[in-house]
Amino acid sequence: MDKIAIYMTAPNKAEAKNIVRSLLSARLIACANITDPVTSHYWWDGQIETSEEVSVIMKSTSELYPKVEAAIKAQHSYDCPAIVSWALTQGNAEYFDWIDQETQKTA
């Protein structure tokens, strides 16, 4: 299975932790790193905005991405949450095996 990293932002640590916990419980991700706070600068409703958010990087597989995205959208408080992924093409083979093992188990 192809490994991916999934990036998401959330308005606060509590929401980020709740989303991460539900994804872990469903075995859709193997792990997540939450960074608090980050300062985000972005266009929204025709204006440049700045806000403090929480960023999250999760590790999973490309096959599970559609389920991860749907689960995040179902729980997220933003109208348009940042959810992006990128392929992990190189890395520690044992770590990649661990991602596979943890996402293949049934909850």
Image: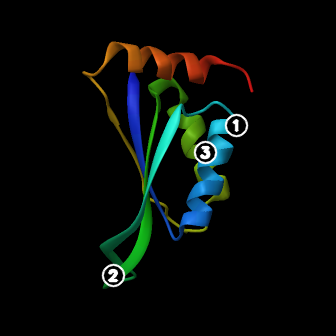
- Residue nearer the viewer, 75 or 91: 91
Q: Position of residue 6 (x, y in %)?
A: 42, 42
The residue type indicated by label 2 comes to Thr
Specify the quadrant of the image occupied by residue 2. top left
The tag earlier along the polypeptide, 3 or 1, is: 1
| Residue in the picture at 31% in, 28% down | 88
Which image quarter is the C terminus in?
top right
The residue type indicated by label 3 comes to Ala
Side of 106 relative to 37 (left or right): right
- Residue nearer the viewer, 70 or 98: 98
Q: Which residue lies under the disc numbered 3?
A: 70
| Residue in the picture at 24% in, 21% down | 90
Q: Residue furthest left?
A: 90
How crowded pointer 3 is (Cα within 10 Å; few <14, some 14-19, many 20+) is rated as: few
| Residue in the picture at 62% in, 52% down | 19
Q: Position of residue 70 (x, y in %)?
A: 61, 45
Please tell me whether mark 3 or mark 1 is closer to you in this view.
1
| Residue in the picture at 45% in, 64% down | 54
Please tell me whether mark 1 or mark 2 is closer to you in this view.
1
Q: Secondary structure at mark 3?
A: helix
Q: CA distance from mark 3 to mark 1?
A: 15 Å
Which image quarter is the N terminus in?
top left
Q: Position of residue 57 (x, y in %)?
A: 41, 46
Please tell me whether mark 2 or mark 3 is closer to you in this view.
2
Q: Secondary structure at mark 1?
A: helix
How crowded pointer 2 is (Cα within 10 Å; few <14, some 14-19, many 20+) is rated as: few
The tag earlier along the polypeptide, 2 or 3, is: 2
Q: Which residue lies under the disc numbered 1?
A: 25
Q: Which residue lies under the disc numbered 2?
A: 50
Q: How many marks?
A: 3
- Can residue 43 be seen here? The reply is yes
Q: CA distance from mark 1 to mark 2?
A: 33 Å
